[in-house]
Image (spheres, rainbow, N blue to C red):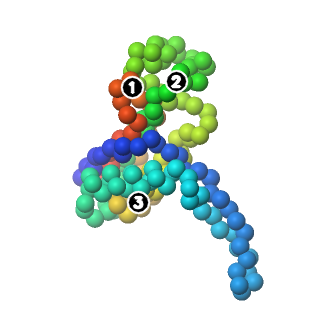
Amino acid sequence: MRIEFTVPAVPVAQPAKDVRVVKAKSGKTFATAQTPTRHPVNAFKATAAMAARAAYQGPPLDGPLVASITFVFPRTGKPGWIKRATQPHWFAEWKAGRRVPYAVRKRCDRDNLLKSLQDALSGIVYVDDGLLYAGPVEKWVASADEQPHVEVVVTQ
């Protein structure tokens, strides 16, 4: 089985959790961790879940799965990484309006992007994100005529 869909949103990475120490009425002290409620990742996860539900209405898949994911970021002013690029043809590609690799140092950790998307799809496309064992993950800057989005293909 193959499930393929697009999430029409700017990709947002999973932030570090807010950790608080709480004292219960019983006197016990424990730590609790949660994602900040006003963080943009919550809207991204909701959009991803909605796109997944629109593309797949069956029961969540169980068993080994492969996910191919492509994150496409908005095309903004000249990307900062171009100054440091070791491959000068990337700048020419960017100037020509083509899709180029999105390689930045901050706020765009590939693992955290993947985590936010996989968490959003858990229970909808698959039973648990631990079932994903392989698949490419790519980050790109959108071409001149492209909107930011996430392309998802899950295969059983």
Q: Nearer the viewer, residue 145 or 4?
A: 145
Q: Is 77 situated left or right of 105 in this image?
A: left
Q: CA distance from mark 1 to mark 2?
A: 13 Å
Residue marked by disc 2: 77
Q: Earlier in the sequence, mark 2 or mark 3?
A: 2
Say which amino acid is labelled 3. Ser
Q: Earlier in the sequence, mark 3 or mark 1?
A: 3
Q: Is 112 situated left or right of 48 in this image?
A: right
Query: Are discs 2 and 3 less than 8 Å apart at CB?
Result: no
Query: Are discs 1 and 2 less than 8 Å apart at CB?
Result: no
Element under label 3? loop
Residue 58: x and y in percent read: 25, 62
How would you rate the neighbour count of disc 1 (Cα within 10 Å): few for under 14, some for 14-19, many for 20 or more?
Answer: many
Residue shown at the point (71%, 84%) measured from the top left: 25
- Using the image, tell me which numbered label, if any, was put on residue 129: none
Residue shown at the point (49%, 55%) measured from the top left: 42
- Using the image, tell me which numbered label, if any, was put on residue 143: 1
Residue marked by disc 3: 122
Say which amino acid is labelled 1. Ser
Q: Residue furthest bottom?
A: 26
Residue 99: x and y in percent read: 40, 25
Say which amino acid is labelled 2. Gly
Residue 124 vertical position relative to residue 21 in the rendered view, above or below: above
Q: Nearer the viewer, residue 77 or 132?
A: 77
Residue 12: x and y in percent read: 50, 45
Closer to us: mark 1 or mark 2? 2
How would you rate the neighbour count of disc 2 (Cα within 10 Å): few for under 14, some for 14-19, many for 20 or more?
Answer: few
Element under label 1? loop
